[in-house]
């Protein structure tokens, strides 16, 4: 399949303004993400941004960038605009959305996210990690996957929630927000608009489930560090300086 890896990046982060350009071990964060996405070997990697200086910085480090509007409500909307700009003839079949604040992400788990699309009926694929820390099981900032097991490494997603679920004995899974869309699924998704459960849980992927789209989840071993706060940034600097 023809695959395009897109990395949405905006400067107007509420908790960490300007974070795409935050220095980590001598390179801007967005460059670390682009480098790791490139190492996945999946195909063309492009940063989608609404800010000239981000695009200029990305290009100065040898990566590709495309400008998008500043008024997008979500990363999915931004990558859809970028897709239309980069591939107006519709040759790209699969779009990988790698969040721009994952500077330590393992290229191997980006590759793993594509595996569920081997099943033709899957519209969107994403990643999950079994939760091992007790405090994360009750943390609303750790979204949980409720899914039907298809194998030891894969779930069919039935719901996503910030609550502690499902109830009873058995593993709980942390949802890692990296998505792979079939092109038609991405187009349908952005055309739907926010759904009731999406707005209630503040979890964008519920929009797809409410519309009857199929999301499968590949289970991986590690949660990449998402940089949302100054504390996260210091942790990323510590990890990557080694």
Image: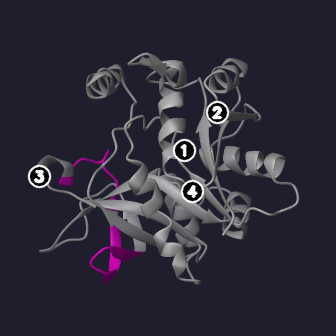
Magenta segment range?
A: 137-156
Q: Which mark is residue 26?
A: none
Front label number (2 vs 3): 2
In the rendering, at what x and y percent does residue 190 appear? 70, 57
Residues at marks 1 and 4, CA–CA distance in whole angstroms: 7 Å
**Mark 2 or mark 1: whose residue is earlier in sequence:** 1
Are circles 2 and 3 on residues that touch, CB within 8 Å? no
Q: Which mark is residue 38?
A: 1
**Mark 3 or mark 4: whose residue is earlier in sequence:** 4
Instruction: Please state which of residues 232 and 26 is positioned toward the viewer in this rendering.
Output: 26
Image quadrant assignment for residue 8: top right
Left or right of 62 in this view: 231: left
Q: Residue at x 58, y 24 (%)?
A: 12
In the rendering, at what x and y percent does residue 19 appear? 49, 22
Q: Which residue is mark 4?
A: 42
Q: Does the magenta-highlighted stretch encompass residue 139?
A: yes
Residues at marks 2 and 4, CA–CA distance in whole angstroms: 15 Å
Q: Is residue 125 above or below residue 49?
A: below
Q: Which residue is mark 3?
A: 134
Q: Is residue 242 above or below residue 107?
A: above
**Mark 2 or mark 4: whose residue is earlier in sequence:** 4
Q: Which mark is residue 63?
A: 2
Q: Residues within 10 Å of mark 4 (few under 14, many from 20)?
A: some
Query: What is the secondary structure assignment of the residue under circle 1?
Result: helix
**Mark 1 or mark 3: whose residue is earlier in sequence:** 1
Are circles 2 and 1 on residues that touch, CB within 8 Å? yes
**Mark 2 or mark 3: whose residue is earlier in sequence:** 2
Q: Does the magenta-highlighted stretch encompass residue 36?
A: no
In the rendering, at what x and y percent does residue 97 appear? 57, 51
């Amino acid at each position: 399949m023809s695959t395009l890896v897109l990395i949405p990046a905006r400067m107007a982060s509420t908790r960490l303004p300007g974070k795409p350009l935050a220095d980590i071990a001598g390179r801007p964060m967005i460059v670390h993400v682009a480098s790791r996405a490139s190492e996945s070997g999946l195909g063309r990697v492009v940063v989608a941004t609404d800010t000239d200086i981000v695009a200029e910085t990305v290009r100065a480090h040898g990566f590709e960038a495309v400008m998008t509007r500043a008024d997008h409500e979500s990363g999915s909307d931004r990558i859809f605009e970028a897709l239309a700009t980069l591939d107006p003839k519709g040759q790209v079949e699969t779009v990988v959305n790698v969040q721009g604040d994952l500077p330590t992400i393992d290229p191997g788990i980006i590759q793993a996210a594509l595996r569920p699309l081997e099943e033709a009926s899957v519209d969107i694929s994403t990643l999950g990690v079994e939760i091992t820390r007790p405090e994360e099981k009750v943390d609303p900032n750790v979204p949980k996957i409720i899914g039907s097991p298809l194998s030891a490494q894969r779930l069919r997603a039935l719901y996503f929630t910030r609550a502690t679920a499902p109830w009873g004995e058995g593993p709980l899974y942390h949802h890692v927000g990296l998505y792979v869309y079939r092109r038609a699924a991405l187009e349908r998704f952005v055309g739907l608009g926010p759904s009731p459960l999406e707005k209630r849980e503040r979890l964008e992927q519920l929009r797809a489930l409410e519309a009857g789209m199929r999301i499968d989840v590949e289970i991986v071993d590690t949660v990449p560090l998402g940089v949302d706060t100054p504390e996260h940034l210091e942790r990323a600097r510590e990890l990557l300086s080694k």
